[in-house]
Image: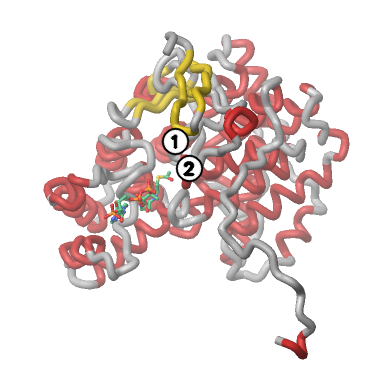
Amino acid sequence: MSEDRVTLNAVGSATELDLVPGTIGDTGIDINRLRSATGKVTLDFGFANTAGCKSKITYVNGEEGILRYRGYPIEQLAEHSTFLEVAYLLFHGDLPTGDELARFQSEITHHTLLNEEMKKFFDAFPKSAHPMAILSSATSALATFYPALQNPVDPYAVEQSALRLIAKMPTVAAMAYKKSIGLPYVYPRNDLNYSTNFLNMMFSLPVEDTEVDPVIARALDVLLILHADHEQNCSTSTVRLVGSSRANLFASVSAGISALWGPLHGGANQQVLEMLAQIHEDGHDYKKAIARAKDKDDPFRLWGFGHRVYKSFDPRATILRNFTHDVLDRLGADDPLLEIAVQLEDVAMSDDYFIERDLYPNVDFYSGITFRALGFPVRMFTVLFAIGRLPGWIAQWKEMVEDPDTRIGRPRQIYQGEVLRDYLPVTDR
Ligand code: ACO
């Protein structure tokens, strides 16, 4: 074996495979020639050992609990940055200068309105519609208003699509919410920053001015930063896979929203809150939840615990744990569910079942409690995750489109079905 190759001896003859190093973290074994050289393919459930791309956007080290966007530690970004600055960083690769940031913020601010035709679209959904279903459909529908922006290899079209998506997603989310509670839509305001404008569209009414608390707006901004990217997770991989067929950015992001909705991914934040509320209703019996999570015959999981990559702590959960207490203190709020969350965490962290399986709280464990403290209803939690993750999806999609090594995503399979059968007419079966 040379330093930049490995030899595979497992299939009769020796095959030399190139190594692809990262600047930090995993080194890949390039198996692009594997099937032609050996007649064999790899089998990797959940792609747990497979790098689907080379990327320069986000670095995660699950063993040491590290998360960096474009090299910047998440802790520094959460403390000093804003969500729009982070969105710029993810999209362009570097932090903006003052002028660049001002231009970017102005572009976003001036694209927050939806085409008035879209209102009819919201009206058509039942009142009970889950806002994630509306968000995904509305994102896909946005493509119909921008036929000129659908060429994925035109940098101008991509940038304009990205700006429109980041600008309009909070408007769509707030309209979906207002629809669900039967209240009138509130239009965006250009004098407000990104998070304040979203909170205003969510919670104010056309009949009176409501002042958004800056503590709440900053807390939301930090939450969005913490969710902004997480390399090749389920929804991001979906966005890349859909985009690899040259589907436009709106269609690709819409698919990502659907992937995020699942309870094993972004939908976990809703599940966590429902679980904590259930424990509260059951007279605070959190030990019952722990016992159920350990019972192999019970499908129940301790929502918000465990992560495919983080096998020590999730740095986002660590930031959020302190942040949540801080936000509750500053808002003068007291949430019994936070107490249950702390108890669950204490028990799980000292219980052999969770220790042996490296199950630590993930970002969803604390985000729900903070979203609740900020006044958001539980059904909007995964929508908030989607708004936060949007810049990451866009940056990853753009990187995929611009990478000359990109090919349409098309995994192989190990076929284990019937080999060959003759058709029998229905009367002979
Ligand atoms: N509660 C109880 N047991 C669990 C949990 C949990 N939350 N998570 C994993 N386990 C157990 C599994 O049963 C399995 O046990 P076994 O080895 O005895 O069979 C072992 O831990 C490994 O779990 P897997 O599901 O195989 O791990 P995987 O990497 O495939 O899944 C996942 C990771 C989906 C996040 C999982 O931990 C889970 O379902 N957690 C709860 C849902 C959740 O919080 N999802 C949000 C993830 S973060 C995000 O998407 C932003």
- SS at mark 1 in the image: loop
Whether residue 229 is visible to the viewer of this picture, yes or no, is no
Q: Can residue 59 be seen in this view?
A: yes
Q: Which residue is drawn at 57% across and 16% down?
A: 93
* Residue 186 at x, y percent in the picture: 64, 51
Query: Residue 297 in the image: x percent, y percent?
Result: 28, 70
Image location (x, y in percent) of residue 13: 51, 26
Amino acid at circle 1: Asn
**What residue is rendered at 35% in x and 24% in y?**
75
Question: Would residue 15 appear left or right of 324 to someone viewing this image?
Answer: right
Q: Which residue is drawn at 13% across and 50% down?
A: 352
Please tell me whether residue 136 is drawn above or below residue 293 in the rendered image.
above
Query: Disc 2 designates what residue?
Result: 44
State whether residue 371 is above or below residue 241: below
How dense is the environment of label 2, judged by Cα within 10 Å: few (below 14), some, or many (20 and up)?
Answer: few
- The yes-or-no answer for disc 1 within 8 Å of ligand 1 is no
Which of the colour schemes (rainbow, by chain, secondary structure, one colour) is used?
secondary structure
> Do the residues under discs 1 and 2 have CB atoms within 8 angstroms?
yes
Tell me: is circle 2 under 8 Å from ligand 1: no
Disc number for residue 49: 1
Nearer the N terminus, badge 1 or badge 2? 2
Q: The residue tagged with tag 2: helix, strand or loop?
A: loop
Is residue 297 rendered to the left or right of residue 259? left
Quarter of the image that includes the C terminus: bottom right
Q: Where is residue 217 in the image (x, y as percent from the top left)?
A: 46, 37
